[in-house]
Amino acid sequence: MNFLQAALRTLFYVVVGGVISIAGAAFFFMNWEPDRDDFPIRGIDVSHHLGEIDWGQVAGDDVAFAYMKASEGEDFKDGAFARNWAGAGAAGIRRGAYHYFSLCKPGLKQAENFLSVLPDDPEMLAPALDLEFLGNCARRPPVEELLQEVSDFAGLVERERGKQVIFYVPEDFFLTYLKGQGLNRRFWARSIWHSPSYVKNWSLWQYQDRGSIKGVEGNVDLNVLASGATLNDLR
């Protein structure tokens, strides 16, 4: 074997090894999950973007609860909400609903929109408010204004449904608006591939945004309940 052949063979092995390493890393991260002994109660969150969901298959894939999008902003209602709510209930999955909060609309108006589709069901999980920058309008209100609008939203929903709202908060939103504000609410943290550190005593943790669940086509968000908690703690 001459020098050129040896060099090409070495290069080939290096390239193949790199591809295998990348594929292995991708497989690891796509399938990473928290320790099941510590976090045994698992769930998903969904919206109309996922299309038709076979909730029977979902229930058979170790999914105990599901949060589903009900509304967004002042007037948008998720067209799949009623279907998902009924399907999850029929499959024996505990259900909760969430509203995506617009930074450009009044909190009270958004609460009214959410309540117009939120079931009056004493067994449902706590209503959730999705607070994040991704996909939101360009406006970034002052902290005091944002907190007032969020408080207006939560106050109305809690009075009408008798359940405390839980706040879904990625790290960037939490640090910008909620850290140190003393809000007496539970938090749903988002921390992909590692445990949350930016918020203490979280109730829910979204640990994956490209998960795979039977009965759902495409990537799905995966969540766990806090260690030692039960779903009745989220009512």
Image (cartoon, grey):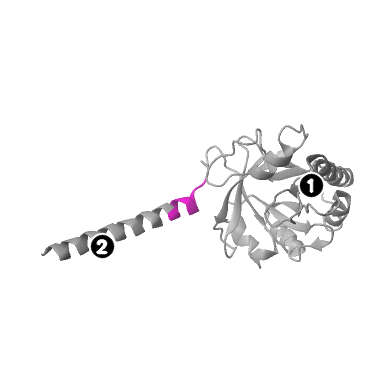
Query: In this orientation, which residue lies closer to the viewer: 12 or 232?
Result: 12
- 19 left or right of 42 in image: left
Is 82 placed above or below 149 here? Answer: below
What whole-number distance in Å separates the C-alpha atoms at marks 2 and 1?
54 Å
Residue 44 horizontal/vertical position (percent): 63, 53
User: How many marks can you see?
Assistant: 2
Q: Is residue 216 magenta?
A: no
Image quadrant where one finds the N terminus: bottom left
Q: Quadrant of residue 144?
A: top right
Circle 1 packing at 10 Å, graded few (<14), some (14-19), many (20+), is few
| Residue occupied by mark 1 | 141
Does any portion of residue 61 appear in the rendered image? no
Q: Position of residue 89 (x, y in %)?
A: 72, 56
Foreground: 220 or 4?
4
Q: Secondary structure at mark 2?
A: helix
Identify which residue is drawn at 86% across, 42% down.
155
Name the residue beneath numbered marker 2. Answer: 12
Instruction: Give residue 34's position: percent from left, percent from top.
Output: 53, 43
Magenta residues, start to end: 26-33
Residue 41: x percent and y percent? Answer: 61, 44
